[in-house]
Image: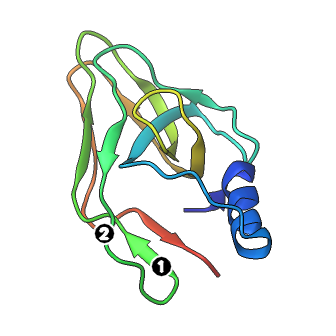
Amino acid sequence: MSSFTDYLEDAVLNYVFRNVGTPTSTAVHLALFTSTPSDAGGGTEVSGSGYARQATAFDASSGGAITNTSAESFTATGGAFGDVVAIGIFDAATGGNMIAWDGITSATVADGDTITFPIGNIDISLT
């Protein structure tokens, strides 16, 4: 992913340098955006037409990187998602905090279309 959010950057710095515990969640969730967020948040998350964030599993970190271990699919039903231009990772199925995001090649998702992120397609790394 291209960027950690300010929220996650602050949590990591406070954990490492101030011994302040970080909030945890039982799962992280993949989200789709029709306008690109930034490290501060924002962007326009897809809504309606059968859309819901997808719980996403990742392998163990190795060499400062992790990848998704299951394919994640979103199918538009009863309407279009529109032009999906970015993804985000959240710490909750709804609401919550965005922890990372990245722009993607724009994909137009019409009613009945499915957008899928194959196993190993979502890479997150610390460099």
Upstream in the sequence, badge 2 or badge 1? 1
- Residue found 60% across the figure and 26% down from its top: 44
Q: Relative to the observer, which residue lies in front, 124 or 82?
A: 124
Mark 1, residue position: 65
Residues packed near mark 2 inside 10 Å, few (<14), some (14 to 19) or many (20 plus): some
| Residue kind at label 1, given as amino acid type | Ala
Residue 3: name its quadrant: bottom right
Q: Is mark 2 on a helix, strand or loop?
A: loop
On screen, residue 30 versus residue 19, left or right, reads left
Residues packed near mark 1 inside 10 Å, few (<14), some (14 to 19) or many (20 plus): few
Question: In this view, which residue lies farthest toward the bottom?
Answer: 63
Q: Is mark 1 on a helix, strand or loop?
A: strand
| Residue kind at label 2, given as amino acid type | Gly
x and y percentages locating residue 29 in the rendered image:
40, 44
Q: Which mark is residue 77?
A: none
Mark 2, residue position: 120
Q: Relative to the observer, which residue lies in front, 38 or 7?
A: 7
- Mark whose residue sits in front, 2 or 1: 1
Q: Relative to the observer, which residue lies in front, 77 or 67?
A: 67
